[in-house]
Amino acid sequence: MAQHNELGKKGEQLAVDFLLKNNYTIVERNYRFDKAEVDIIAQQKGTLAIIEVKTRSTNDFGNPQDFVKPKQIQRLVKAVNEYVIENDLDVEIRFDIIAIVKQGKGYDIEHLENAFYHF
């Protein structure tokens, strides 16, 4: 597996661990619809958090969250709409980003709630 893929998988697991520690329930991982993949669907109280995980080995080229582009957001929204319909859900939905940057042997994790709004 390519090194960036391994880093991405590691980042997703760190994000899941972070969410569990913060009283979220993981509902789904890597949900796919059409051309979109939702990294993590989690729930906390009555809110469904749609979480995009961005992991980088350095922030020399910008913060991880800066790499979520409008086209990706559109695809995520379309996938989440399908997920909500498919599962007949009636919940608040929030789009978050968990940005992870490798720092030596550790990782900095930043959870950005309501990171973007669907349009």
Image (spheres, helix red, strand yellow):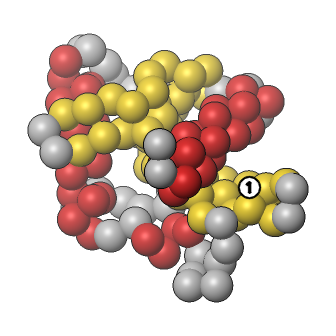
Under circle 1, the secondary element is strand
Q: Is residue 34 above or below residue 66?
A: above
Q: Is residue 66 left or right of residue 56?
A: left
Task: State the residue in front, 10 or 68.
Answer: 10
Instruction: Classify residue 57 as left or right of residue 61.
Output: right
Specify the quadrant of the image occupied by residue 20.
top right
Residue at (60, 64) in percent of width and height = 56
- The residue that disc 1 covers is 109
The x, y position of residue 86, in whole percent, is 19, 18
Please say whether residue 48 is visible from this viewpoint. no
Q: Residue 106, how many percent across, how many down? A: 85, 54
**In the image, residue 103 lies at what x, y percent?**
81, 65
Q: Is residue 26 left or right of residue 37?
A: right
Picture quarter with the C terminus: bottom left
Q: Position of residue 82 (x, y in %)?
A: 18, 30
- Disc 1 crowd rating (10 Å Cα; few below 14, some 14-19, many 20+) is some
Seen at 53% across and 29% down, the residue is 42
Residue flagged by tag 1: what amino acid is it?
A: Ile
- Residue at the location (27% across, 69% down)? 70
Which image quadrant for residue 12?
top right
Tell me the residue at 13%/38% (across/down).
34
